[in-house]
Amino acid sequence: MSGPSTRTWYWQGVRDGLPFTLVVTPFALLFGVVATEAGLDIASTMGMTILVIAGAAQFTALALMEEQAPTFVVLLTALAVNLRMALYSASMSTHLRGAPVWQKAIAAYFLVDQSYAAAALKYEREPGASVSAKLGYFFGVMTPVAPLWYGFTLVGAVAGSAIPPEYALDFAIPITFIALVAPSLRSLPHLVAATVSVVLALALVWVPYSLGLIAAAIVAMAAGAATEIALERRRAPA
């Protein structure tokens, strides 16, 4: 029995990706403004947003560049912020195995929080779908998201400091992460890792060059892993 076509999955992805535009638009606009205020010209801002396409890492890099942090610290911190992409990639590889290399390369480029969150949930619900259908859904999610990310970054870069302070858009950053991460906290290890990361990140905010963020991430991952191991040992038969 054949399931829904790739085209059907694609349009399901487009529909499921539309809600993300509500947070991507102000997020992109804010990045454009912040980047120009940090001294980047429009070409550099657009080059960064197109090549990196990872808002959290981009904001982190900009903040460190403004603090005159060493280049290796900027790169290390940005990579630490994006460590979750390695986990996303490992999760997606089990579903997209068998796809042509060029399609997997494009999917890797568009693997962001929004595409992963929607695709992981969809694949979990319908694990037996074909690889082409899963890819269609993945690219469908990004169809309304990616153009807005590029477009409103450009709008923000052009507008620059013309936006009055009373209309500050920095609220979009925490809202985006809360909306994406909160539904994923389904187990005790997840909650332990999230709690440890929040507490340590706040406690180490005084550490120069935001290195406290890296330390908090490492300790949080270790705490989550230790909790998972402890739970498995308790479940194991004596």
Image (tube, grey):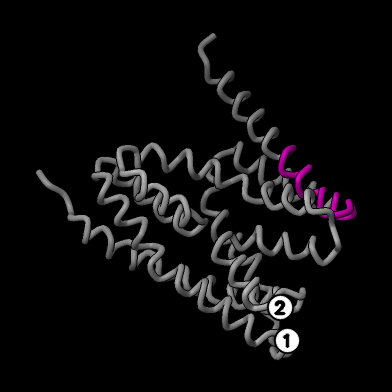
Which region is colored magenta? 204-219
Q: Amino acid at mark 1?
A: Ser
Q: Give the residue drawn at x 63%, y 43%.
A: 191
What residue would you read off at disc 1?
161
What residue would you read off at disc 2?
36
Q: Give the residue drawn at x 52%, y 53%.
A: 183
> Where is residue 129 drawn, in percent x and y?
24, 45
Q: Residue furthest front?
A: 43
Residue 96 position (above or below residue 135): above
- Relative horizontal placement of residue 222, taking residue 87 as reference (left or right): right
Camera-nearest residue between 59 and 232: 59
Q: Secondary structure at mark 2?
A: helix
Q: Secondary structure at mark 1?
A: helix
Q: Give the residue drawn at x 35%, y 50%.
A: 103
Mark 2 surroundings: few (<14), some (14-19) or many (≥20) residues within 10 A = some
**Dot 2 and dot 1 residues touching (CB under 8 Å):** yes
> Where is residue 231 drawn, in percent x and y?
59, 26
Residue 152 position (above or below residue 79): below
